[in-house]
Image: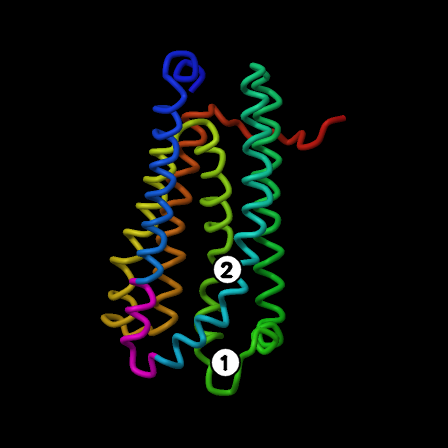
Amino acid sequence: MEERLKQENLKSLLFSLAIPAILAQIVTLIYNLVDRIYIGRMEDGALAMAAIGLCVPLTTIINAFNGLFGRGGSPLSSIALGKQDHEEANRILSQSFMMLVLSSIVITVVFICFQDSILYLFGASSQTIGYAKDYISVYVLGTIFVQLTVGLNYFVNAQGFAKFGMLTVLLGAGLNILLDPVFIFTFKMGVRGAALATILSQAVSCFWVLHFSFQAFHFTYSARLFKT
């Protein structure tokens, strides 16, 4: 990335980074649309859709935490790399990685322990609570995959690997679109199948981005998370 900053003009560099990010957002939008189409075609699709809507606050909370540690840590890591301070960059990435893992565990435990209360707080009724529990009880188990995939992808994009960041989104969304009908209709798992398709696709994306992080960033986990 440093060489590109020296050699390429700002306009072409901006487009090379912005276009993959825009395409990734479009793919995410299409995936969410297709996902809802599959769920809507279920028997009792209206209730299932309403139940999935109740789980949106959960995904918002998860995205808030991966945004906090991913968007917060990635520019700091980039600044450190710009200063050729690789030890500091690795420390920041390690710290963000650990916080993503810890927040995943906390979110998972809280939602498992207080599942019913939280869903009723979100607006569940006697008609939708069953579908909502079916979905969230599976989805929340994959919180760590979502956290690491999205959180680390911020670091990938911040280092100038926007195309790889886009491929990470494409991989997860593509697998999800393929797995949704299999689990929902073929295996007759309903909303549980939709949730399972999501966490399996996110798991694949997670290992994909982890592998890239270790290879491209020469990331080695540092136990010294905080400066002394």
Q: Decide if residue 173 is on the left or right side of residue 6.
A: left
Per the image, label 2 sits on a secondary structure element best described as helix
Q: How many marks?
A: 2
Image quadrant in which the C terminus is located: top right
Query: What's under tag 1, amino acid-wise?
Result: Ile
Query: What's under tag 2, amino acid-wise?
Result: Thr
Q: Decide if residue 149 is on the left or right side of residue 107.
A: left
Q: Is residue 225 above or below residue 151?
A: above
Q: Mark 2 or mark 1: which comes first in sequence?
A: 2
Which label was assigned to residue 129?
1
Q: Specify few, some or many for label 1: CA neighbours under 10 Å numbering under 14, 14-19, or 20 or more.
A: many
- Going by the picture, which residue comes out furthest to the right? 228
Predominant SS along the magenta part: helix
Residue drawn at x 37%, y 72% is 191
Q: Is residue 23 above or below residue 174?
A: above
* Start-end of magenta stretch: 34-45
| Residue 135 location (% of width, % of height) | 44, 70
Residue drawn at x 38%, y 45% is 205
**Residue 1 picture quarter:** top left
User: What is the C-alpha distance between the residues marked 2 and 1?
Assistant: 17 Å
| Residue 144 location (% of width, % of height) | 51, 51
Q: Specify few, some or many for label 2: CA neighbours under 10 Å numbering under 14, 14-19, or 20 or more.
A: some
Residue 68 among magenta residues: no
What residue did someone put label 2 on? 59
| Residue 25 location (% of width, % of height) | 38, 47
Q: Decide if residue 163 is on the left or right side of residue 137.
A: left
Per the image, label 1 sits on a secondary structure element best described as helix
Residue drawn at x 57%, y 27% is 77
